[in-house]
Amino acid sequence: MRLPHGYLIVQGLATYNASRFGAISTAEEAEKLLSQLDGRLDALEYESLFFDDHDLKAHEAVARVAATHRIDLWTSTFRILGRIRSFGAIRPEFQAHVMEPDGRIVPAQFPHEAGTAPQPIFDVLNPEAVDWFLTEYRSKYFERMKGLLAGVFFNEDCIHYLAKWRNDRRCEYWRNITFSPRVLSLWREYCREHDVTHEGKLVAKFPVHDPAMVANGGGRTACYPGWDVPEVIQPGQRFVDLPRAQGVWRHWYDFTCDLFLRNWIGRFAAAANETNRGEPKWKGTMYFGLHQWSLPYEQIEDPGFTVPTAHRWGAWGRQRGVDLARMAQHPEVDVVICETYPPIAANLEGFVAEYARITRAAGKTYGVMLHRDDEWALKLDEEPRRWALIEKYRPTVIARYPHSHMLPGNKFYSAEGERLFAEGLARYRKLST
């Protein structure tokens, strides 16, 4: 992919069948919004909150307005697991499974409030399930939007995790949605192909770390040593010194990361690229991952990169199903963007540098988000630090969140902040790549 140096994509443009939940629904709203952004950005992350016909009519109408403003729209996968039901009911065999702390394996459901029906979670690791979904998605969305989109923006896609966790605490493997009957059959195939054995016997069950969990696993689990992922990390620890999963457990993380990439990211991207091949606006796919769970600590090479005191960020990529090196090497992934959370002082340079090294080693286009300002205005003292880091690592793509803060009238709008941002972007674009 060839994108201009300093290509700016800003997040958060959503559509719906009505102007609710922060979304717009009409061409008139789109014209009012996009006319204020003319010349200030190259692209917007673009999502539909649902996928019924009325939703997609609004989505298409807004996209046509964006085309007149020459703004690229990158369709987003944000929260797409919760929206798959708009393409049809999720069949029981396509529902993901999760493990309880005591070792029981149960169907995975989204958390729900009392009085509401629980919603099943779609199994992105099941090839037949993804066959069904992509057939529906391609015909009802990609074909309809052909010629109006610039690409796919994989927004924080990782293996869904059904628990709360802290930045400095590992993700517990049993709360990942990786335990369906179909995944077990694929794990057995992997073990045969890679000769994964324990005490001379071929592994054929899901791994658990505690013998007490096996009794509740319904004959589908076995206890193996080597789950050496640190439970908690401390500020100042060097990432290169942290213990790593061994034996069967190393293979388990290899397996889940590879399956997630091949069966979800790779196939979704391929369907998008195939549908839009030959379209002049089409640019490809971007993977956008938050630094703390998309960068695997096992792939960090800088011995001086330590756990920061501010926020105590970890680097739990493989524990969330993201092998960044493999992601960057995938032929259907064109751009890899490191999303960060302020401040710069929270050792963000270490994440940006490792992400850049891994992405560029794979020959892919690198991007970074240092302008993430969720519920505050641009901090004027942070702007010089952000642009200094951008100028040092020279990403092609710059991401920013959210677009609403760029508009006068928003309570977080800062005229001075926008002036500094525009000056920084203009200066950066003049630098050679």
Image (cartoon, rainbow, N blue to C red):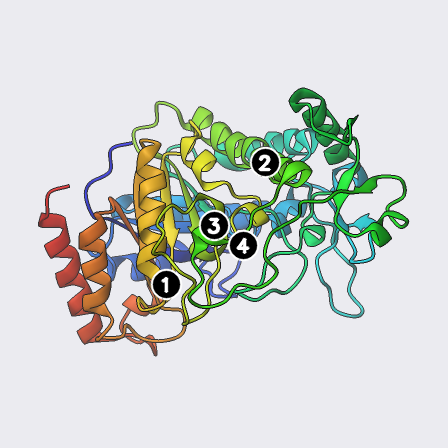
**Upstream in the sequence, badge 2 or badge 1?**
2
The residue mark sitting in front, 2 or 4, is 2
**Upstream in the sequence, badge 1 or badge 4?**
4
The image position of residue 430, as x and y in percent, is 9, 49
The residue mark sitting in front, 1 or 4, is 1
**Upstream in the sequence, badge 1 or badge 3?**
3
Label 4 belongs to which residue?
Answer: 49
Mark 2–mark 1 distance (CA, rounded to whole Å): 34 Å
Closest to the observer: 306 or 317? 306
Q: Are marks 2 and 3 in contact (CB under 8 Å)?
A: no
Q: Which residue is rendered at x = 51% and y = 48% of the image? A: 317
The image position of residue 372, as x and y in percent, is 35, 64
Q: Quadrant of residue 112?
A: bottom right
Q: Is residue 122 left or right of residue 336?
A: right
Residue 297 is labelled as: 3
Element marked by disc 4: loop
**Upstream in the sequence, badge 2 or badge 3?**
2
Q: Which amino acid, mark 2?
A: Asp
**Upstream in the sequence, badge 3 or badge 4?**
4
The residue mark sitting in front, 1 or 3, is 3
Label 2 belongs to which residue?
Answer: 254
Label 1 belongs to which residue?
Answer: 402
The image position of residue 24, as x and y in percent, is 44, 60
